[in-house]
Amino acid sequence: MDYTALAHEFMKNMGQLHRHNAQKRLNDSMHGEDFVLSYISKHGGNVIPSEISNEMGISSARIAATLGSLESKGMITRMIDVSDRRRILVELTSAGKEQVDQHFQEMMEFTTNMLCYLGEHDAKEYVRIMGRLAERKREDSK
């Protein structure tokens, strides 16, 4: 099999998807403010900024800027940890929780529609293949 030719076809298709914003919405949800809000929500609040920075693989300065933006929008609060005054804890506000819920519903609707378009067989294959790729990434990061 010519994997190089297949890779070219794959990149061409991904480029077309990206230009038409089909995959971009899913990718964007895995970065930026929505990711930060989701991360805080999944970890029950009281998250320290360095945990978010490590998970996203970006600088502490960039996380600080993102948290500042979210705080100014009323989505999070930052507080000094009473047990360790050197640490800052980040927690969602009710507006932040609503944003997480709304974003999750939008992504579920988008993903469900995409999988319905593929049909049962192709949708299952797509999810299976994405799972294999994710597994490979986990193995590579060990």
Image (spheres, rainbow, N blue to C red):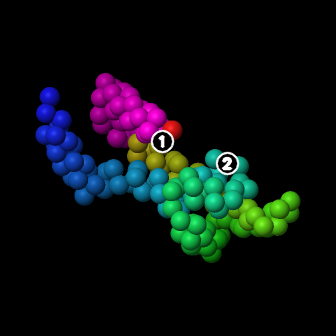
The verdict on residue 105 being magenta is: no
Q: What main secondary structure does the magenta stretch of the protein show?
A: helix
Residue 112 seen anywhere in this rendered image of the structure: yes
Q: State the mark number for residue 141.
A: 1
- Image quadrant of residue 2? top left
Q: State the mark number for residue 121.
A: none
Q: Amino acid at mark 1?
A: Ser
- Taking depth in this image into account, of 40 and 122 the one nearest to the observer is 40
Q: Which residue is mark 2?
A: 43
In the image, residue 28 lies at what x, y percent? 42, 57
Label 2, label 1: how far apart the Cα atoms are:
22 Å
68, above or below 130, in the image: below
In the image, residue 33 lies at what x, y percent? 53, 62
- Tell me what residue is drawn at x 47 percent, y 53 percent: 30
Residue 94 seen anywhere in this rendered image of the structure: no
Give the mark nearest the N terminus, 2 or 1: 2
Q: Secondary structure at mark 1?
A: loop
Q: Amino acid at mark 2?
A: His
In the image, residue 113 lies at what x, y percent? 37, 41
Q: Residues within 10 Å of mark 1 (few under 14, many from 20)?
A: few
- Taking depth in this image into account, of 64 and 44 the one nearest to the observer is 64
- Tell me what residue is drawn at x 82 percent, y 67 percent: 85
Extent of the magenta region: 112-141
